[in-house]
Every structure is written in structure tokens, then in C-alpha cells.
Image: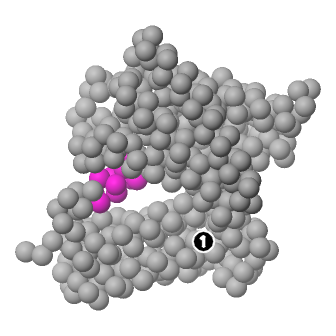
Amino acid sequence: MEDRSAASVGVAVAALALAAAAFPWGTTGVGPFENVVVAVLGGAALGAFSLRRRDLLGRVPGSLAAGVASLGIVGYAAVAVAAPVAGGSALVAEAPSAPSPWGVGLALLGGVGGVVAAYGDGRGFPDSLRRAAKAISWSLAVGYAGLFAIAIWGSLLVGIAGGLMPGEPGSAMELALGAVALGFGTGTVALLYFQWTDKTVSYLDFRTPSLRDVGYVVGGVVALFALQAVVTVVLSELGVRTANHSIQQTAANGDASILLLMIPASWLIVGPGEELLYRNIIQKDLYDTFGDWGAVLVGSAVFSLAHIPAYATGASVGALVSTLAVIFGLSLVLGATYLRTDNLTVPALIHGTFDAVIFGAMYFQLTGGA
């Protein structure tokens, strides 16, 4: 019987691309779709993969149709992100404002995943590549499920705060609630993962650091800042810009004191929450398929792709890609320390310390220390 597992993966990622059309894109929408082009391309990819999965469409025409539609989604998303910086384009002529980072992220995830799935369906994956494709798809699904859970918790917390407090929550309050939502969101996905896979609390790798672990924490923090310094110099020489984080944009356009809230949140929520999801769950789950260092590489790729929504607003494609490349390098350090110590507290402390120092530096840069 002909294997159609790649087409099954294609159905899942094409559904993500179709969902991306429901987010704002600065274009005229129809019904529930804010972007007709993405909806048509996503629907075409979904239809082709679905017909292939049920063996109602031949391998060559089915994979070709799905691949072309998926590639079109990637191209459209890239142009849509670049258009606001360039002042508009033929594709997004009506509004030069930046599209929703959620829409761009899902479109890129669904489009790139669709191209890979279509290629695998057309050529036929060997068993090892088929298992690798499934593992990567699963990791991306878990990573983006974490983002959705964070968004849902954020909306709930803002709604509750709005009901308890007079007036609309300010930017500082929203940022604080967003940090809390990150902890709730990653925790929710972790609980669902444990339930789905029958894991127990013993699967968690949070432990009190040993003296050796403390050494890895210090070395990891130094490595992150050294890597950032080198990358900053290299990108500056090449004339390549990086994108600003949404928190930095909010602080620059409002009250910079909100950055002070993010310093303790980095250690207490952001570091532990993100490392729980991307290292203890995603990277650890990839060991059996890719091996130790392969899992670090793939997990870091998933980690960087998950940051698209945070950096896509108002950024050019080049700036976004260079920023994701930097995040990928930083994630390699976090993944390597987790691999070497098998203690999630180590990368959580490294991550939290790095973010806390960055937020503190942003505050002094914006305020001059006043």
C-alpha cells in the first residue's frame, strides 16, 4: 500500500496556513477570512493534501498542486512583511501597515511545512526521513500551541483586569499580565503534554543546581553575551539590521518603566516557562529521533521560529530573518547546557539572566538611568 503519511502531515500544516487567513493582514477580507489570497492558497493546499491522503489524487499532480500552493503562501507572507517597510506593494496596496504577526507566523509555518510535505509526498520519504518529518511537525505544533495558550491566557487576564479595574489596563499592566500569561500558557501545554503522553512529574528536570551546574550557568551567560557581541559586530559590518522585540517597541512608544517589570519576570516566569516548553518537552522529545545534538539543532530551530510573532511587527524580511538567526544561535547555547547537565534549572537561569540584563540595558538606553 502506498505510504501517504507525508500527505497527512501536509493536511495539518495546510490547516495552519488556512487559519492564518483569519488574522488581520491589512487587506480586504471576505467572511471570516481577513486575507483572500492566503485563504485561497491555503484552501488549495489543504484540498490537494486531503485528496492525496484519501488516494483520490495521483502522487505527482497532488504533490505538485500542494507544493505550488504552499510555496505561494511563503512568497505572499514574505512580501506582506516587507511591504510595510517599503510603503506598500501590489499585493498589499490598500494598507502599508504591518500585518498580524500571528498571521505571518502561521502562514510561514504552514507554507514551509507544506513545501516539505509536498516534496516528501512526491518523492517518497524513506522511513528515517518520515519519522524525522513527523517529529519536526510535532515539535512545531507543540511550540505554536504554547504561543496560542499564552495568547488565550493573556486575553483572559486582560479581560479580568478590565472588569476589576476602572478604565482600560495600561501598557505596564498589559505587559505584566503578558508575563503571567506566559507562565500559565507554557504550564497549560506542559500539563496537556503530560496527559497526552502519560508522563509523570518525574519527567520534569528542574533540580537544585550543583556546583558544576553553577559553573555551566556562569559559562552559559558569558557565552550568550559573547555570541551576541560577535553577531552584532558582524551584522553591523554587513549592514544588516535586526528586528525589535514587541516589548522594546512598546517601551519606546510609551512608559519605559515597564521594562523594570520584566527583569524579575525574566527569572521567575520567562526563563523557566520557555525552557520548560522548548527544552524539557520539545528538545527532550526529539532525542530518540535525532540523537542528542541533532535534537539541540532541531529544537533551536523550533525555538527561533516560535519567536516570529514577537519580532514580525513592522520588521523587514531581512531584519526578521537575521533576528531569527541570532535567536537560533542563542538557543543552541541553552540547548547544549541542558543536554550537558540534564538539569532544566541551568538553561532557565541562563535564559532569565540574559533577558533580565537585556531589559535593564534597554531601560537605561531609553531613560539614561533617570
Give the main secondary structure, helix, strand or loop, of the magenta stretch: helix
Location of residue 230 in the rendering, given as x and y in whole percent from the top left corner:
65, 43
Name the element at disc 1. helix
Location of residue 170 in the rendering, given as x and y in whole percent from the top left corner:
78, 38
Q: Quadrant of residue 319?
A: bottom right
The residue that appears at 42% across and 26% down in the rendered structure is 344
Residue situated furthest left in the rendering: 1
Q: Is residue 357 left or right of residue 135?
A: right
Q: What's the residue type where badge 1 is placed?
A: Ala
**First to last magenta residue range:** 133-142
The reply to whether residue 224 is in sight is yes
Q: Quadrant of residue 43?
A: bottom left
Looking at the figure, which quarter contains the C terminus?
top right
Rendered view: 118 above or below 196: below
Q: Is residue 87 left or right of residue 367?
A: left
Location of residue 52 in the rendering, given as x and y in whole percent from the top left corner:
24, 79
Give the residue pinned by disc 1. Answer: 78
* Residue 186 lies in the magenta-colored region: no
Rendered view: 274 above or below 89: above
Q: Is residue 231 left or right of residue 288?
A: right
Q: Is residue 333 left or right of residue 370?
A: left
Location of residue 312 in the rendering, given as x and y in whole percent from the top left corner:
64, 58
